[in-house]
Amino acid sequence: MDISVVVVTYRRLKSLEAILAAWLKETPDVWLCDCSREGFKTKLPVNIIHASPDPGNRLRHAVALLTKGRLVIKADDDVMPRAGIAKDFIRCQEITGPAIMGIHGRTFHGKGYYMNTKLYGSKQLKDKPLKVDFVGVITCAPRAYLAFDLNGCNSNIEDLFWQMRCFPKAPKYIIPTDKFHHLAESKDAGRLCATPKDRHERGHFYTNWYNKNYK
């Protein structure tokens, strides 16, 4: 199997059925990390892991190890995939070789996460993957980059922890694709990493990492 998908949710259930249905059109191996209090239910043929208390986004890294694909997509619950996105990830992995890929990413230019990094997105690219220092939102990686110790991998830094602390030497690329769209929920004020506390902790993690690696 080429691709597996892991989606994590904790409160955005309104569009979740449609998101899962869209991913099932890309692969039959779809997993949901349900961290909501409601206990999401569906008749769709997806594998559901119900977790309470909420272990946060780090759960998707653990569940990724249960999948079957040679490449594993980890996806947020506020982005709707469109037909062909899995093929775009596969095509770009064939171009670059083993890498952690995503639809958004940053290059690092200084010790301030919000001031000294440059943000790029998949829809800005034409036909070639763009090498960056960090990727996010929807990521895809081969199995070699799935297994790591989750101790210290807090929910609001889990993507930075995975890519920068555990696999800092893994190549990272943004892929050229327009086969997704952000739902309105992606802009809500309570989203993870948007609160002052979350922004501070992400910035603090990044600055410490940058100072240790770019002296």
Image: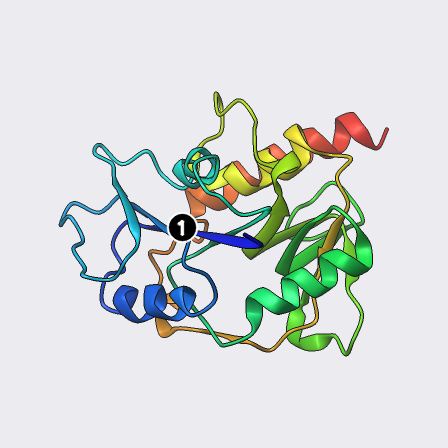
Q: Is residue 159 above or below residue 104?
A: above
Position in image of residue 69 (x %, y %): 53, 47
* SS type, badge 1: loop
Instruction: Sort mark 1 into few (<14), some (14-19) or many (20+) by Cα contacts within 10 Å.
Output: some
Position in image of residue 130 (x %, y %): 79, 62
Identified by mark 1, the residue type is Leu
Position in image of residue 14 (x %, y %): 22, 67
**Can residue 165 be seen in this snapshot?**
yes
Q: Please state which of residues 140 and 208 is positioned toward the viewer in this rendering.
A: 140
Left or right, residue 36 beside residue 26: left
Q: Is residue 184 above or below residue 133?
A: below
Question: Image quadrant for the C terminus?
Answer: top right
Q: Please state which of residues 74 and 213 is positioned toward the viewer in this rendering.
A: 74
Q: Residue farthest to the front?
A: 1
Rendered image quadrant of residue 144: top right
Rendered image quadrant of residue 37: top left
Q: Which residue is mark 1?
A: 192
Residue found 74% across the figure and 46% down from its top: 98
Figure coloring? rainbow
Left or right, residue 117 beside residue 205: right
Q: Residue farthest to the right?
A: 215
Q: Count numbered badges in the picture.
A: 1
**Can residue 117 be seen in this snapshot?**
no
Residue found 78% across the figure and 76% down from its top: 127
Residue found 79% across the figure and 50% down from its top: 97
Residue found 22% across the figure and 32% down from its top: 53
Q: Residue farthest to the left?
A: 38
Rendered image quadrant of residue 45: bottom left
Position in image of residue 115 (x %, y %): 69, 53
